[in-house]
Amino acid sequence: MPFRIAFVLFPDFEELDFAGPWEVFGMAAKYVDQTWEPFTVAEKPSVRGFLGMTVAVDHTFESAPAPDLICVPGGFGTRPGMDDEKLIGYIKRTGAAAQYVTSVCTGAMLLHRAGFLEGRRATTHWGAKKELADLGGDVRLVDERWVHDGNVVTAAGVSAGIDMALYVVGLLKGPVEARKVQKFMEYDPAPPYAEVTA
């Protein structure tokens, strides 16, 4: 049986929020478990990200197969996305039947609007925590790189999605396999300009 992973895209999604986890799950599909099937899905056949990347998606909301895991990126498109009935409806419908529901950055706002964060611990981009808290509901925001609560895994901003996806690979296939994916990706962050605190 295939294990289907849906990347839910919308106008003005943040590119690395999508591409980071896509690389992780796609690499796992090549080298760890070839039954894994990552795919992109959106309302329309193509969608443009915030920085200009245009993605010709694999499926529309109507044609997509039922996923076992959904990954919702963030980006400035999440704000209008919260009022997009088709987008929220897809997340709510597929997430309810999925094994895992995940988000990166402000994708947590879409999970919140779809009802997945109520009573859970969660995280989002540091600059959007107040904005998410102001949406109301019983969401306990924490300052962590990723947060796992029940079957929901949220990641902080942008690059944190890579760590979140590696964590999920470890949940599903074990830490040894997750480390293989990390090694294939040569993912060993060492930024040249480390943050200096006064």
Image (cartoon, grey):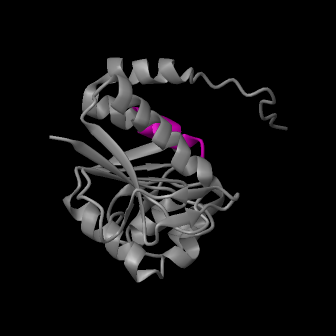
The C terminus - image quarter: top right
Tell me: 37 left or right of 17. left
Q: Magenta segment range?
A: 158-166
Q: Where is residue 137 in the image (x, y as percent from the top left)?
A: 40, 73
Q: Within the magenta stretch, is there residue 165?
A: yes
Most common SS among magenta residues = helix
Tell me: 190 left or right of 3. right
Q: Looking at the picture, does residue 41 appear above or below residue 184?
A: below
Q: Within the magenta stretch, is there residue 151?
A: no
Q: In which quarter of the image is residue 91?
A: bottom left
Q: Looking at the picture, does residue 165 appear above or below residue 34?
A: below
Q: Where is residue 41 in the image (x, y as percent from the top left)?
A: 40, 61
What residue do we see at 33% from left, 75% from top? 89
Viewer-proximal residue among 127 and 173: 173
What residue do we see at 23% from left, 55% from top? 98
Q: Position of residue 84 (x, y in %)?
A: 46, 80
What residue do we see at 52% from left, 50% from top? 18
The N terminus - image quarter: top left
Tell me: 81 left or right of 192. left
Q: Looking at the picture, does residue 24 appear above or below residue 70?
A: above
